[in-house]
Image (spheres, coloured by chain):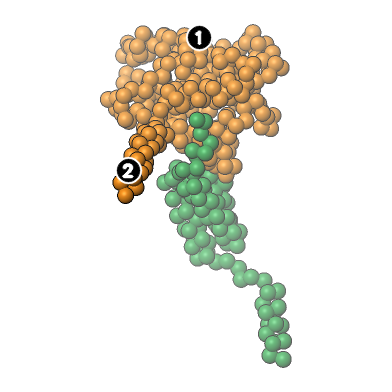
Chain colours: A orange, B green
Amino acid sequence: MRTRSANRFVSLTLALAALALTAPFARAADTPDPAADAKAFQKYFTEKFPKLKPEDFVNGPYSMNEDMHRQWEEKEQFPPYEFALDAGKDMFAKPFKNGKSYADCFPNGGVGVRQNYPYFDEKEGKVITLELALNRCREANGEAPFSYVKDEMASLTAYMAFTSRGKPMDIKIPSDPRALEAYENGKRYFYTRRGQLNFSCATCHVQSPGERIRAEVLAPALGILNAMPIYRSEWSGMGTTSRRFTTCNSQIRGVPLSPQDEEYRDLEYYLSYVSNGLPISGPGARP
Amino acid sequence: MRTLLLIWGCLIASMAPALAASEADFKASYAAAEAAEKEAGQLRNQWTTTEAALAAAKKAAAGGDFDQAVASSKEAEALAKASIFQATSEKERWKDLEIR
């Protein structure tokens, strides 16, 4: 009798110990962990493309094979984004009607700060992208906002990216549950299938980078935003991150959201965070 | 004999051309398609093909072709419902693709 009670006691103790040990792991699997995500994300791509150095990923499709890389090197001799870069530099320096300028709206006068965008604004409780910050700067100084997708906005962000070239992406997630929620929303958007073609961002840029979709070589998701804005031959012009997101949605037969809608800003936050440490290479050029 | 007449009647009925759709038929089918597309919009998951089918339905109705207008409306409704299904099923399924 005493032996049976002792056995029961030992069994109960073991069961409780097992519960105590497994419970934290079960919780951990559900708890968002951006640092672990970024590590796993970068590991996935570096293992998929073992010949590439981490910094090569920012060249998108041009990093995927030698022929493409040669094309990129030749393109960089006379880069097609050069006109936008020059225009952006002039626009950035030109004061607004009230005498102030873009430099007054950004830390360090807006020079070499691209790697810190987007950031989570704890006062507003939302993600602020560089494009949004630029238009807010304009509006705060009595100027009309620019289109988020191309032309002037692409020129301005091209210049700002250029001043940050080589600096590692450095996106922070502050200790604020809303920031973590924004990050998680961005992650969900990235992996969610949408449009009649039933594609997610990950379908092309995680499962199939380096593969062709029609004539295009798909870019890896790692470092994909480090090159923004880009000159795309397909567009015959420059385009911003907003343009990239909206056209991706259209291509899979989904109705795009409005540029700078919350989902897109959160997506940019997520994608930029998981590319932390990779250099800014924008403005870029793509086929 | 009665069975034969019944079969004969069914054959004639199936061979007869369907009744042409009316404006009221179009309005009913278009409203159903629009309601489904609105729901897809609330889920932030509309498809360009649904929008195209809705536009085609309106264009056909404006030209007085209510058969085509009803067909396009029904196509739009089916597409909108598929996009709703997609958005609903992806609420959890997106995690299957996540890099961990």
Task: Specify the quadrant of the image occupied by residue B71.
Answer: bottom right
Residue A80 at x, y percent in the picture? 60, 15
Counting residues from the start of the chain, the first of labels 2 and 1 encountered is: 2
Q: CA distance from mark 2 to mark 1?
A: 67 Å
Q: Chain of mark 2?
A: A
Residue drawn at point x = 35 percent, y = 13 percent: A106
Left or right, residue A158 beside residue A24: right
Residue B76 at x, y percent in the picture? 54, 53
Left or right, residue A256 beside residue A137: right
Q: Indicate whether A184 appears above or below A110.
A: below
Residue A6: assigned label: 2
Note whether residue A238 is visible.
Answer: no
Left or right, residue A13 beside residue A166: left
* Residue located beneath label 1 in the image: A166
Inspect the image, locate mark 1, and give the three-letter code of the amino acid beneath it.
Gly
Residue farthest to the left, as pictured: A123
In the depicted view, which residue is nearer to us: A106 or A68? A68
**Disc 2 secondary structure class:** helix
Residue drawn at point x = 43 percent, y = 45 percent: B43
In the depicted view, which residue is nearer to us: B12 or B63? B12
* Quadrant occupied by the N terminus of chain B: bottom right
Note whether residue A111 is visible.
Answer: yes
**Disc 1 secondary structure class:** loop
Q: Which-is-in-front pick, marks 2 and 1?
A: 2
Say how many tags the image has: 2
Residue A274 at x, y percent in the picture? 47, 23
In the depicted view, which residue is nearer to us: A280 or B15? A280
Q: Indicate whether B25 appears above or below A263.
A: below
Residue farthest to the bottom, as pictured: B1
Q: Indicate whether A111 appears above or below B61.
A: above
Q: Chain of mark 1?
A: A
Residue A198 at x, y percent in the picture? 57, 42
